[in-house]
Amino acid sequence: MTTEATVAAECEYVRVAVERGIDRYPDGLVYRVDSALGAVALGSHVQVPLGRGNSPTDGVVVVSGGGELLDRGLDPRKVKGVLTVDRSQRPLPETVVRLAQWIAAYYCAPIGVTLASITPSAVRKGIGHTKQLMVDLAAEPPPGKVHPKRARILEAIAALPSTQRPAEAAQLQEQCGLATRAPIVALVRSGHLVATHRSVVRAKWASEAIPEGPTPTPTREQSAAIESIGARLDGGFSQHLLFGVTGSGKTEVYLRLAERVLNAGKSVLVLVPEIALTPQTCGRLSARFPSLAMAILHSGLTQAQRHEQWLVAGESAPTIVIGARSAVFAPIPDGRLGLVIVDEEHDHSYKQDQAPRYHGRDVAIRRAQLAGCPIVLGSATPSLESWWNATVRGASTLHTLTQRAPGLRTPRVEIVDFRVESRLRPDRRVHLIGPTMEGALRRAFDDGGQAIVLLNRRGYANWIACPDQGCAWMMRCDHCEAGMVVHLGTELTHGMRTTRCHHCGASQKVPLRCPRCAKAVSIFGLGTQRVEEELERLFPDIAASSGIVRVDSDTMGSAADFHAALGGFGRGETRLLLGTQMIAKGLDFPNVRVVGVISADTALNLPDFRASERTFQLVSQVSGRCGRGDNPGRAILQTFQPDAPAIVAAAAQDYANFAREEVAARTRYGLPPATRLARIVVRHAVREEAEAIAATLRESLAALDAARDAEVKEPAPCPIARIADRWRIQIEVIAPTAPALQKLIAQGRNAGIIVPGEIVAVDVDPVALL
Ligand code: ADP
Ligand code: ZN
Ligand code: ZN
C-alpha cells in the first residue's frame, strides 16, 4: 500500500514561478519531477502545465527538493508533473532567482513579468546559436590504407594536444589548407573520424580602438578611498558612497578596487547609466585589464551579441561584467561576485519606467547583500537617497574626493541672466544663444578647442499657439493632455513642419492658421533642432565641415550612432557636440573649453518634488565636462531664474550645501529621502471609471491595518492627466520607513486591493511624478 507520505518521499519536487502575467504565487507552484527528466536544479527553465486546461507554461524553478515541498497539506497525487526542462539554457544562479523574488515583492510586480525581464529574449530564444562540426579520431578505425591527402588530416588531429580535441572542422580545414570540407566529411563517412556538434554563440563585434594611457598614480584622496574600501573587500556586504567632484578620478578608484578583486579570482559587476557611458568605461576597463574576460550588457547590442555576452557573464573565471540597468541580473555564478560598482548612481535612467519598476541601483545593493560583497556607489552629485543613507542613516560609508585629478583644472562657471542678455541683441529676433555664450564659443573655436552645448529638450519648439491672447488656442495632442512639439523635416513630411507628442509618439501637421480664429499660428519655445539651426547660422564654417553634431534620441537611433558621435568628438573631427542629457554624463574629453547650457531652468518648474535636485545634477554634471585638459574651461549657464538655489549651488559647485538645504526642505514636507513614497496610478480610457476605481482603491487601502503607519493620500489627477488615451489618477502612499510602506503594499496586494496590471500601476520609490 502506498501512503501519501511514501509517494512524497520517493519523488523530487520543485517550486516553479510561472512566467505568465498572473500576479500570484511569488513563491512558486509545486510540481513533481519525474525521474525521466533527470535532476532539475534551482534556476532551471522549465515548462509546466497550468490551470484547468493544463496549458504548457514557461517558468523558472525557485526551489528544488523532495517531499518537504509538499507542505500546506498538498496531496501528492494531485501534484502535476513538470513537462520539459530546457537544458540549452544554464540555470539562473540562486542569487538572481532570489533577486527576482525580492523585486516582485518590493516593487509590487508580478513574479512572471519580473522573471521574464531578467533573461534577455535572445537567450531564451537561442538567437545567435550556431552549430559547429567537431571531429576526432575514431577509436577503432576501419582497416586498410587511407589516401595520403586524407592521412594528413588524421595526422594533424593526432598531433593536437588533448585539450584541443575534438577539433573544430573549420579550423582543421584551414590548418590543412583544404579548399573544402569534403575530405573531412569523407573521413567521417569512412569511419576514420567521429563527428560531434558543438553549439556556440558567436556574435559579430564592431571592435573598438582602445585608448592606451599610462596608469596614473592615485592621489592622496584616491588612495584613502581605495584603502578604506579595499580593507572591506573580504568582509562580506558593505555599502560605500564615493562622492567625488566631476573629474576627481572616481574611475581610477573603481579600477584599483576591481584589480584587487579580480586578482583574488572573483568577478566585478559595473553598472553605468544607459548606453551613454558604456563605450568610454569599457574602453578604460579593457585598457587596464587587456587579458581579462569582459561581458558587456546594454540595450544597444544586437540579439546575438546579447546572447553571447550573457554566456560570458555566466563564466566562473574572473570576469568584468559591465552594463546598463538590466546588467544587475547578469548570471554571475553564485559565490563568484566580489564587488559591485554603480557609477553615476544618481542617474534616473537606473529606474525602469515599466513593470517591474525597479531601481537598478537599489537592486544592485540588494544583489551585493545576497552575494555578500561590497558595493560602491559613485557620483559627483549623489542622489539625496544615497546622501541620506551615508550621512543620516549610517547605512553606508562616505568617501570623498574634493579635488580634481592632477592635470585637470576647475572650470569657471558663470550664470548668465537671460532676461538681460536677450535684450542685448540689436535685431528683434528670438535668439537662444546670448552674446556671452556666443563669444565664449567663438573664442574656443578660434583657439582650436571644442565645446558642448546642452538643451534637455529635443525637437524644434514646444509651443504652437494662436498669437491672439483672447483666442488662446494651443495645439495639444489628441491622445494626451500635453502640448505637441515641432520637429523639422523628416522624409515622411518632405520638409513640412510636423509635430510630435513626446508622450505617446503621435504626429500631426502644424496648421498654418488657428483653427478657431484663422490667425497665422505662432511657434515658440526651445528644442535642440532650433539650437542647431542657430549654431549653424552663427558658426557657418564649422557647420560646413560637419563640425557640429547633434546628439539626442532623434539622431541617435542606435548605440552605434552614439559610439560614432563620441568617436568623432574624441578625434577632434567634431568641434561642437550639441544635445540633451545624453551628453551631460561622464564624458571625459580634454579639449573641451566651453560648456554652454541653453536654459538651465528647463526642468526647474516641473510639478515634481525632485525638480531642484534634477536641475542641480544636470547643470553640475554638464559643467564638469570642461576643464579636463590644461585649459580651465568655462561653463555658461543661461537662465531666466539666476537666483534659483539649485542653479546658484550648481554654479558654485557646492553639493554639500545644496544637499543640506534640500534635505531640510524634504524633511519639513515629509518627502523622500526622509520618508518612503509609492505611487499608485489608475489608468482607464473612461475618466469617470478611472476616478471611481481610484476612489475605491484608496478607501480600501486606507482601511487596512498597516495604513495606521502610513498616509494614503486622496486620489488626484496625475500632472499629465491623460497619456495615449488613458486617463491617469494617482494615489500617493507615504510611510516613515521602507518596511512600513512594504507592509501596507503587501497587505493591499494580498487582499486583492492592489492588482498590478493594465489598469493599476504601482511605482515604489518613483523618481518621476509626471
Ligand atoms: P570622474 O569620473 O570622477 O569625473 P575620471 O575618472 O573621468 O573622473 O577622471 C578624470 C581624468 O583624470 C581621467 O582622464 C583620468 O584618467 C585622470 N586621472 C584620474 N586619476 C588620476 C591621477 N591620480 N593622476 C592623473 N590623472 C588621473
Ligand atoms: Zn500624445
Ligand atoms: Zn486663434
Image (cartoon, rainbow, N blue to C red):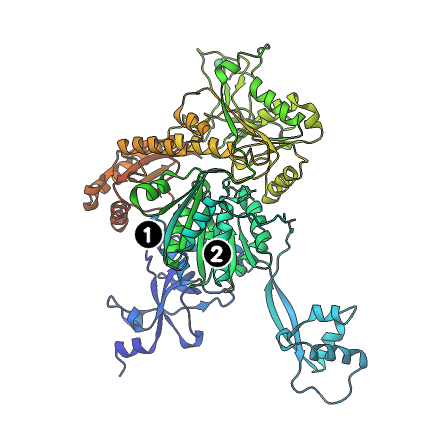
Label 2 CB sits under 8 Å from any ligand 1 atom: no
Label 2: few (<14), some or many (≥20) within 10 Å?
many
Q: Is residue 87 visible?
A: yes
Comparing 365 with 472, the one in front is 365
Q: How far apart are marks 1 and 2 (CA)?
A: 27 Å
Q: Is mark 1 on a helix, strand or loop?
A: helix
Query: Mark 1 vs mark 2: which is more N-terminal?
Result: 1
Q: Residue furthest bottom?
A: 143
**Placement of 144 over or under 630, stated as above or below:** below
Quadrant in the rendering for residue 170: bottom right
**Which quarter of the image is occupied by the N terminus?**
bottom left
Point 32% across, 55% down: residue: 24
Q: Position of residue 730 (x, y in %)?
A: 32, 35
The residue labelled by disc 1 is 105
Comparing 444 with 177, the one in front is 444
Q: What amino acid is labelled 1 in the image?
A: Ala
Q: What amino acid is labelled 2 in the image?
A: Val
The residue labelled by disc 2 is 268
